[in-house]
Structures are given as structure tokens and as C-alpha cells.
Amino acid sequence: MAGVVQEHLPAPSDPALIDALHENEHVVIDFGVVRKVASRDAAFIFHEVI
Amino acid sequence: MNVALRLYPLYRDQGFSVVSGLNALHWNQRRWVPFTKFLRSGKSVTWHLGISLHEVNFLDSLATISPARSVLVIGNSYGWSAVALALANPDAKVTAIDPALSPDTLEGLKITNAIAKAAELALVAVRGAAPQDVASLVPEHLPAPPDLILIDALHNNEHVVVDFEAARKVASPDAVFLFHDVHDFNLYAAMDHVRATGLVVRRLMATPSGMVIAFPASREGSLAPVLAVYGPDEADLAVIEYESTWLQCAKRKSKTWRAWSRNIFPRLPIRH
């Protein structure tokens, strides 16, 4: 993730949309990974939470 | 700024909270929850519902590609559509008419005008009934024949035809007509009448109420971008209908159906 973000985004991501595997465990993993490369004031959007 | 983002604060400033755009699947399949509720002091102020948040975005999109000059709204309630149209079409004059036969719709006229004044919108909501008052009210309040008309009053085929004919008499030759709640209230007989006048009639099934747009054929090109988004092709809708029917069957609890849904249904050709 870190390599992809640095290669394609000029700045830390803001906002970030997480819309991959819809299970709690995977969403936590995705969030944890994205959080590391997001900007400090990033907004996170999660699809299909309900 | 997006119309919806400007619309909500205008009602908040009048003391309302607004809820719109909810997913019926999350609220006991209540089909009305995508539409707009006006609340004050923890209570609903009217049983009338405003157009849905998604439909507000449709009006915004429509205005982006084809801004109106003169807008008529038949059926005002709390002015949600009229204010949205005024925000979306800043160069247009908007007039909404409503017979205001109940205390809440009478208040709705006052609220609409208060919002128009506060936001300095070229919008006026007047008390009047279609068809009998349209011919007099329109020239009184609109400087030009309306080129965009939203019909959202009584939801039965006979009244929609009456409202349409009244509006058509005062409309500009290139006017676009929008009809709310056509699919939800099965107003297709009225749409057959509209089609018979020579207008192109397109369902907007990507709107929660199943709106319809009717326009002269000469406008089809300019409206194409919004039709592509909000009015899916009927052939594509047939695919959705087919797939949703099979998925419904697959949810049945019988083992046979579950087995079939796994093994047989995916191999059947998709119906076009």
C-alpha cells in the first residue's frame, strides 16, 4: 500500500474511500493500512457499513 | 455549491430539521423514507413528503446542462422542490402554486416565501388551484412562458392530465415537463396522454419515485447527458428486472431452490 500510494499520489491521501471486502476484520485491516499513508486530517469514507 | 448543500440550511434557519434520502431497506422497507420529511420540535409537521434527496440532485443536474429561464411548479407543499429549482436555476423566475386547502400546506406557502425572501431567491409561492388559476397566475408572476414545469400535485391520472393541459396552455413551445411519482402512483395512463400530444416521454427510473420527463424532440440532444444518468435504457432495466427476479427466487429457504440458484440459474442466458 505504501509503495502504491507514494508512486501514484503526490500527497498523503485525503479523503480515502474503503469499499473492498465487506467484513469487519477486512475493513479494520484496510483502515489500518490506509491510515498509515493518509494525511493527518484525512476523512475516511466506508461504504455499506449498515 | 451543490443545491442540496444549500437547501438544508435554508430550512434549518426556519426552524426545521430535514431528513431525506434514507434507504428503505434500513427502515422496515418503508417506501416513503427516501423522500423528504420536515420535522420541528421532534415532530413531523406535515404528512406531505418533499421530493427525495436524489431527486433534488436530479434537478441540480438538469439545471447544469439545461438551465431554465421560467419555472412553474404545480403543487408546493413546503416548497422543497420550488426552492431547489430556484437554487438550481439562479437566472430563472420560479412560481409555485398550491390550493393550500389544509393548515399545513397554507403554512407551507408562507415558509416557502420566507425562505425565498431570506435567500433572495426569485421565487414566489401563491395560493391557487390548477387548472382554473394557472392561466391568470402564470402571466402575473412569470415574465415569460415557463420553459420548465414540475407537476407534483394530486397523484391520480385524471388530475395529472388536467394539470398538464393547464400548464401546456401557458408553457413555452420548448418547455420541459417533469412529473413526480409516476411509477409509484401508476400514472402511466396520464403519460400516454402526454405522449399523444407529440412530446417525447422518458421514464427516469433512477429517481426514487419513478419520475417522468417529457420534452419536444428538439430538446433530446441537449437533455441526453441527464437522461443517460437518471433514465436508464428500457432494455437495461429489463436486465435488472430479470436478475432481481432470480435473486428473489434464490432467497427462498427450500434446499431445492438453493441448489438450483447455485447450479442452474447462473447458467441460464440473461433475458434481454
Image: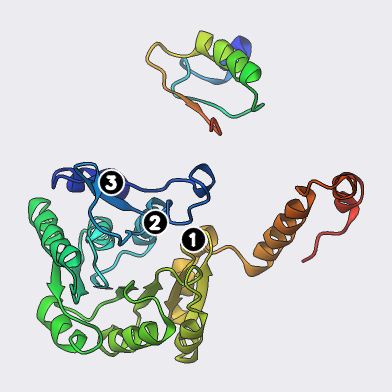
Numbered disc 2: secondary structure? helix
The structure residue drawn at horizontal position 48% and vertical position 82%, both measured from the top left corner, is B191
What residue is disc 2 on? B61
Q: CA distance from mark 2 to mark 3?
A: 21 Å
Q: CA distance from mark 1 to mark 3?
A: 29 Å
What residue is disc 3 on? B18
The reply to whether residue B239 is visible in this rendering is yes
Provide the chain ID for the residue under circle 3. B
Marks 1 & 3 on one chain: yes
Q: Earlier in the sequence, mark 1 or mark 3?
A: 3
Select label 2 or label 3 by which is in front. 3
The structure residue drawn at horizontal position 41% and vertical position 80%, both measured from the top left corner, is B156
Query: What is the crowding at mark 2: few (fewer than 14 residues within 10 Å), some, or many (at least 20)?
Result: some
Left or right, residue A2 beside residue B97: right
What residue is disc 1 on? B225
Numbered disc 3: secondary structure? strand
Provide the chain ID for the residue under circle 2. B
